[in-house]
Image (cartoon, rainbow, N blue to C red):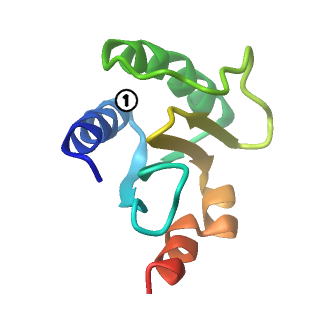
Amino acid sequence: MKEETRRKAEQLCTFLTDHKGQEVSLIDISEECSWTDCFIICTVTSLGHLRGLAHEIWGEIDSLGLVVNNRHKAVGDDGWELIDCGDIVIHLMSQEMRDFYSLEKLWAKFGK
């Protein structure tokens, strides 16, 4: 992963942690994936927390000079918001969604 991308991703992880995101993970998938360098995965505690965090993170994304490729007007009710910033893809997920999809385990398999 490029150093600038890593720095920005780490800043986003800090932002999510500071805003009560849980189990924030940064996964470097640059060797396994051609369309992004890393995933940030964060567990939210409720639908309201998901909506608030998704709303608040836009300012941080803008301040880092990142471009969002899939800006939605409203957060859905399924417990998962994906924010595609090109080299960085952010997954804000309920615990249920995170447990079900196990993205960390999925991408670890590709890395072997």
Q: Which residue shows up at 69% across the image and 68% down it?
A: 100
Instruction: Give left or right: position of 13 versus 80.
Output: left
Q: Nearer the viewer, residue 12 or 95?
A: 12
Secondary structure found at label 1: loop
Please provide percent x and percent y for residue 99. Answer: 62, 67
In the image as oriented, which residue stretches furthest toward the right?
77
Q: Residue at x 50, y 36 (%)?
A: 86
Q: Quadrant of residue 49?
A: top right
**Residue 72 horizontal side relative to residue 107, left or right:** right
**Rendering coords of residue 40 (x, y %):** 44, 48
**Above or below 92: residue 83:** above
Q: Say which quarter of the image contains residue 79.
A: top right
Q: Residues within 10 Å of mark 1 (few under 14, many from 20)?
A: some
Badge 1 is on which residue? 19
**Residue name at image x 37 percent, y 35 percent:** 16
Quadrant containing the C terminus in the rendered view: bottom left
Pick the front one: 49 or 27: 27
